Image (tube, grey):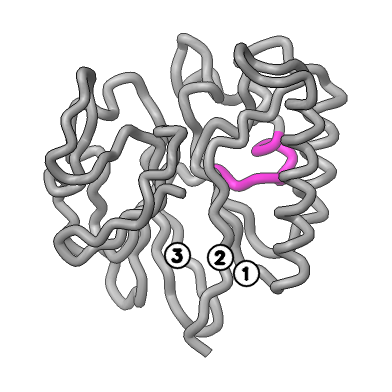
Amino acid sequence: SNVLRVIVINDVHLAASPPMGCTERYTEDIKNMLTEARNYARANDAQMTVFTGDFFHSKRGTPPGLIRWAMELLQDWPGRRLAIVGNHDQSYRGLASIPDQPIGLLFQEGSLEWLQEDVVTDLGDVLVQWSGANYFPEIDHDPANFSLARLPDVRWAVKVAHGTIVPPRKPFPYHTVPMDTIDTTGMDLCLYGHPHYDVGINEVNGTTFACL
């Protein structure tokens, strides 16, 4: 079968206390959402789950118990679990800080796999290339940060990104990356997080962009 069973989860923002403007049920709601996603992955025999950044909300002060809870949940999650990092996953030291951050512990323990270099997976005899665009402060300044170099023999080439990608010709008063400015040569699909709103599914220059 050529049906790929992949779950994509954007911007979890797991935290021990509610971020500004959120209800007191925030932590419970996020835990329930993750548990429901894990159960859905089980029930549907998911081959892969992709997290598009900002798994944790706080750069420091995340209680060990909450990290352990996430670790145990993910280790009981079916299929391969790829993740990139967002702005909330790192300190002022950027990507170099990841080993010291909560998400770094998930990587070290094998609960998540950090998509730093391109990875090719064989999902039901279909070769899929996964190419990450991990967040750094200037990522939205250059559309080239969201391109990929397609590898030979892959059926699908997928970009996984954390950036402010927006539909064509949609103006914003800050740095954004309109989809039609990205060189999508060789790219079939771009899965991304960071905007925090439903950008939807957009077909641009033969590539599908999805942020839901």
Q: Residue at x 57, y 48 (%)?
A: 9
Q: Secondary structure at mark 3?
A: strand
Place of residue 33 in the rendered image (x, y in percent of width and height, measured from the top left): 72, 44
> Is disc 1 in contact with disc 2, using a CB cutoff of under 8 Å?
yes
Neighbour tally class for label 2: few under 14, some 14-19, many 20 plus, Cα within 10 Å: some
The amino acid marked with disc number 3 is Val
Q: Earlier in the sequence, mark 3 or mark 1?
A: 1
Is residue 100 visible in the rendered image? The answer is no
Neighbour tally class for label 1: few under 14, some 14-19, many 20 plus, Cα within 10 Å: some
Pair 3/2: label in front: 2
Q: Secondary structure at mark 1?
A: loop
Tell me the number on the disc at residue 120.
Answer: 3
Q: Residue at x 45, y 42 (%)?
A: 116
Q: Is residue 100 left or right of residue 10?
A: right
| Residue 68 in which image quadrant | top right
Q: Which residue is mark 1?
A: 47
Find the distance from the CA under tag 1 to the CA under tag 2: 6 Å
Q: Which residue is mark 2?
A: 6
| Residue 141 in which image quadrant | top left
> Is disc 3 in contact with disc 2, using a CB cutoff of under 8 Å?
no
Is residue 101 visible in the rendered image? The answer is yes
Extent of the magenta region: 106-114
Place of residue 86 in the rendered image (x, y in percent of width and height, measured from the top left): 48, 30
Q: Residue at x 61, y 15 (%)?
A: 21
Place of residue 123 in the rendered image (x, y in percent of width and height, measured from the top left): 54, 76
Q: Earlier in the sequence, mark 3 or mark 2?
A: 2
Q: Is residue 158 above or below residue 44?
A: above
Neighbour tally class for label 3: few under 14, some 14-19, many 20 plus, Cα within 10 Å: some
Q: Earlier in the sequence, mark 1 or mark 2?
A: 2
Instruction: Check residue 72 for magenta coloring.
Output: no
The amino acid marked with disc number 2 is Val
